[in-house]
Amino acid sequence: MQFVKHAELQRALADAAPEIVIPPLSLLPATPLPAAEIADENLNIVRHKDSGCIQFVFPTQTAPMLLAPMHPAAGRMDWFKQAALRVSERMTQRMAETIEAHNKPEALLSLRHGWRQPATAAELAASRGRKVLLLVHGVFSSIEGAFDDLAADGTMQQLLARYDNQVFGYDHWTIAKTPQQNALDLLSHLPADAGWEVDIVCHSRGGLLVRSLLSTVPHAEDAVLAAVAGQRAGRIASVGKVFFVAAANQGSPLASPEEIQHFLNVAAMLASFSGGMALDLVIGLARMAVSLGFELPSVEALASGSALIEQLDRNDTLLTSASTYYARADFDFGHSMLEQAGTLINRILLQTDNDVVVPYDGVLLPEAQVAEASMLSFGTPQQKQSEVWHTEFFKQPTLRQFLIERGA
C-alpha cells in the first residue's frame, strides 16, 4: 500500500496554518522516531516511514493511553513528524464549515453528468413523480469518493438506463452537521411537490441519514427529526428498495467519547489509502476534537447507543423488511494489508466482528428479519476475511452484481 493523499494532506495543513507550531518541512528528522517520544502538548500529525500512513499523536494531557502496551507501534522507530499543531482556541461551527467547504460544497448531484454536477432546476422539475435512485455517502466521504467504483464495469451506466437518468447523489458535510440535519438539508434541495418514488443506496454513516430521512414520527423528541417528517410530505411520495452497505445503523463503538482517538486514527489509516474517505476532513475533525474536548454532536450521533439511534429505533419508519437489503463484512485485521500499514490504534477494538468501523451485526436494523436473498456478507464470525473492509465494498464485483440483480 502506498500513500496517495498528498493533495489532501497539504489542503489540511493549509487550513490549519494558524495552528502550526513549526513549518512542517523543518519537522522531518533524519531518522524516524517512536510515537511515544513525539508525544507532547501539541496535536502531532505523524507519517509511517514505510507505508506513509497518517496517524495522530494526541496531546499528552488528553491521551495518556498513548503509551499503553496495547499500542505496540508506539514504541517502534517508525514515525516522522509531519506537522505539530497547537490547537488551543475553541473551534467554531463556522470554522468547521470552512474545513468542509474546502473539501466539497453541499449539493444534490445529477449523476447522468458524472460525479460533481449539481442538479439543475429543470432536471429536478423533470424528476417530479418519477422513479428515482438516490445515492448517499458516509462519514468523511463524497458521492465520487464513495461510489466511483460503480463505473468500473458499467454498473453505473446500467443504473442510469434502468432509472431513465433519474439518478441523484447527495454530497453533504459529515463533521459540521448531524445526520438528521443532513436529512433536512437534503429535502430542502427538492421541489415541494417533487413526489419522488425513491430507491436508495447508502454507505456507512449514510445509513443514519437515510433512517432520519424516513422516520415517520412528526412530533419526535428531536426537533430536527420532527422537521424532517414535516418537510418530507410532498417531496417523497413513496420508498421502494433501500440498500444499506456497511451502514452504521446501530452506530460504531469507535465513535464513543472513550474511543474517539482510536476512531480518528482508524479513519486516518483508511483515508491514507482509500478514495472513500478524505484525509483533510479526518485531520479537520481531529483538530475539532482536541479543541472542543472530544464533544462533537456529529460524532456523538454515530456512537453506538447514541440518542439519535435510540430515537430512530423507537420511531416508526417508511422502511419495510421486504424492501430492505444489506451488505456487511467481517474483517480479519490481523492478516490484512492494513495491519502492515502501521497504526497507533487499539488492536483489541479490531478483534470483534466488524469491518474496521461498523460492527458486523450493527449493519442491520433493530429486530430485522432478513431473508437470505436480501443479505450479502463478506466473511462471517466463523470465517473472517481480509480483503473487504469498510471503504472497499463498491470495489467488489459481487456487491455491484448484488445491486443490479436485486433491482437497485
Image (cartoon, grey):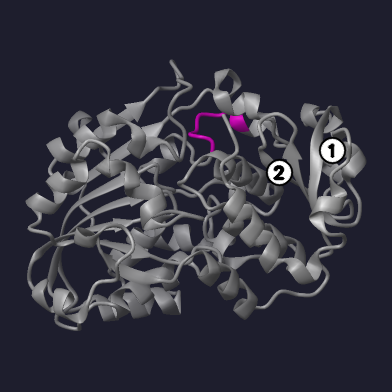
Residue 166, percent from left and from top: 14, 62
Image-based side of 41 in relation to 194, left or right:
right
Bounds of the magenta segment: 350-356
Residue 180, percent from left and from top: 42, 69
- Secondary structure found at label 2: strand
Q: Is residue 9 above or below residue 221?
A: above
Contact flag, marks 1 and 2 (Cβ < 8 Å): yes
Name the main secondary structure of what is drawn in magenta. loop
Give the residue pinned by disc 1.
Answer: 35
Q: Is residue 297 above or below residue 364?
A: below
Assess disc 1: are there few (<14), some (14-19) or many (≥20) residues with their C-alpha within 10 Å of its C-alpha.
many
Q: Exactly how many numbered labels are in the figure?
A: 2
Residue 237 seen? yes
Q: Is residue 60 above or below residue 210?
A: above
Find residue 394 and report its image quarter.
Answer: top left
Say which of 281 and 197 sits in front: 281
Give the residue pinned by disc 2.
Answer: 55
Extreme residue toward the bottom, this view? 192
Residue at image coords 44%, 74%: 221
Q: CA distance from mark 1 to mark 2?
A: 10 Å
Residue at image coords 69%, 30%: 342
Mark 1 or mark 2: whose residue is earlier in sequence: 1
Residue 213, percent from left and from top: 32, 66
Residue at image coords 20%, 81%: 121
Residue at image coords 84%, 44%: 28
Q: Is residue 361 above or below residue 25?
A: above
Residue 5 belongs to the span the image colors magenta: no
